């Protein structure tokens, strides 16, 4: 798996928000990715959770006092600022946000922020009334203008019982945002459309046909393209996966819905990566549930071939397809590449162990328009996605 956080120094600043209780989980997940974590707590934070919890988790003292002498860090605020590869302030209270916006330095956390030349990520968390107060919004705008990175809080039910925007984002999303600081931002200029998952075609109101696609390959591509700075639209059929952080997610069910969503975005994107396993056939829909006693014979008609249509209406876009096949995947992939006017096709034999639907890994062969082939070994889908994006970047660079 990609391990961008290995040995990275993450300084975590915890403030007096109720969401402080979620920080042990963040620390554990960062450590699982190989990161080293040290914690600063404000006085407010210590009212919610004890420093002992964090010193036990991190193996370091928890730093709380700018005037205390910590033997490993004699000038505590500057030493911690130097130690950090990134300073993450999560949860960030309205109070600390106001102090940071003013450039105040009257406690350890704010002094460290002033002394820090590394990226500072602020994750506000508070009741929606607090969050939308003009003063808080103005402070957040000021932070962004002053070079801080601010993560939008999530919507949903809050600990105070109200509903709205103000929740600390999911831990996975905070980690994805942190990881972005360690990715090259080499796709920043591009807008990329990715499709993923299966499509479903209804037989009657309770039954449908679909395929085994899990969506993992397409989701990995979308996640990493966004992490590398691309503007990403992910159009996906039904899967068990969370939409990756930072992508514009469009959820669809049928092939027709996927076609409409894809064509709406098509004119404005630089590249389309069709990793979805689109249903090739659709039954005739029966509006009433078919009774068991009546038996069931399916008449299937062909759905529209979205990739072929994209090839037909192609202008400036780079078009990348996937060919999940059995038998002779390379011959079939080559045929699709030519017929559908693709720039690149990724072929895989879904009957091979570790390749294809539902697995964490994939083994693929790339075939380019000029006939060049690249056969890659079995890799995690994220690694396939990362390498594939390198190739796509190369093709996009050549096109412009
Ligand atoms: C039960 C409780 C929950 C609170 N939750 C939040 C919160 O989620 N976000 C916030 O900005 N302030 C919250 N506050 C208010 C802060 O704790 C208070 O402004 C405090 O001064 C912040 O201290 P600090 O910013 O120095 O950590 C809460 C207070 C209490 C008593």
Image: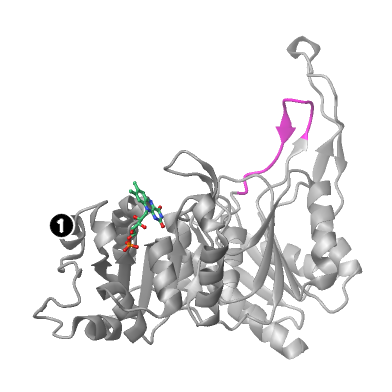
Q: Quadrant of the rendered structure where residue 397 is?
A: bottom right
Res. 255 in view: yes
Percent x, y of residue 113:
35, 79
Q: To which residue does mark 1 refer? A: 52
Q: Residue at x 79, y 18 (%)?
A: 290
Q: Which residues are magenta?
A: 202-213
- Residue 178 vs residue 135, the one in the foreground: 135
Percent x, y of residue 306:
83, 57
Residue 40 lies left or right of residue 103; in this view the side is left
State the quadrant of the C terminus.
Answer: bottom right
Percent x, y of residue 100:
41, 75
Q: Is residue 8 above or below residue 308?
A: below
- Residue 237 vs residue 152, the one in the foreground: 152
- Residue 367 vs residue 383, the one in the foreground: 383
Percent x, y of residue 71:
8, 80
Q: Is residue 137 above or below residue 158?
A: below
Q: Is residue 383 above or below residue 289?
A: below
């Amino acid at each position: 798996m990609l391990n961008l956080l290995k040995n990275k120094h993450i300084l975590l600043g915890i403030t007096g928000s109720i969401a402080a209780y979620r920080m042990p989980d963040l620390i554990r997940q960062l450590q699982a990715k190989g990161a080293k974590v040290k914690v600063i707590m404000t006085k407010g934070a210590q009212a919610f959770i004890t420093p002992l919890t964090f010193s036990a988790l991190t193996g370091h003292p928890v730093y709380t006092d700018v005037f205390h002498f910590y033997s490993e860090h004699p000038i505590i605020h500057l030493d911690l600022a130097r130690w950090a590869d990134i300073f993450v302030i999560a949860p960030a209270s309205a109070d600390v946000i106001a102090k940071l916006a003013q450039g105040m330095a009257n406690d350890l956390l704010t002094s460290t922020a002033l002394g820090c030349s590394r990226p500072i990520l602020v994750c506000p968390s508070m009741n929606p009334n607090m969050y939308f107060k003009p003063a808080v919004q103005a402070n957040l705008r000021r932070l962004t203008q002053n070079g801080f990175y601010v993560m939008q809080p999530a919507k949903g039910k809050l600990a105070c019982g109200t509903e709205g925007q103000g929740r600390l984002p999911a831990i996975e999303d905070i980690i994805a945002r942190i990881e972005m600081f360690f990715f090259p931002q080499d796709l920043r200029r591009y807008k990329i459309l990715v499709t993923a998952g299966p499509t479903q075609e209804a037989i009657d109101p309770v039954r449908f046909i679909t395929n085994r696609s899990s969506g993992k390959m397409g989701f990995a591509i979308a996640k990493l393209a966004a992490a590398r700075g691309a503007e990403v639209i992910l159009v996906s059929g039904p899967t068990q996966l969370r939409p990756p952080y930072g992508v514009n997610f469009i959820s669809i069910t049928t092939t027709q819905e996927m076609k409409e969503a894809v064509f709406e975005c098509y004119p404005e994107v630089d590249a389309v990566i069709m990793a979805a396993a689109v249903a090739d056939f659709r039954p005739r829909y029966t509006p009433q549930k078919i009774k068991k006693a009546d038996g069931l014979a399916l008449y299937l008609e062909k759905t529209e071939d979205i990739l072929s249509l994209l090839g037909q209406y192609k202008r400036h876009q780079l078009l990348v397809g996937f060919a999940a096949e059995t038998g002779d995947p390379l011959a079939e992939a080559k045929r699709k590449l030519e017929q559908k006017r693709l720039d690149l096709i990724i072929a895989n034999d879904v009957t091979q162990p570790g390749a294809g639907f539902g697995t964490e890994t994939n083994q693929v062969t790339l075939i380019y328009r000029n006939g060049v082939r690249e056969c890659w070994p079995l890799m995690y889908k994220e690694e396939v996605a990362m390498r594939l994006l390198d190739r796509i970047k190369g093709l996009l660079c050549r096109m412009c």
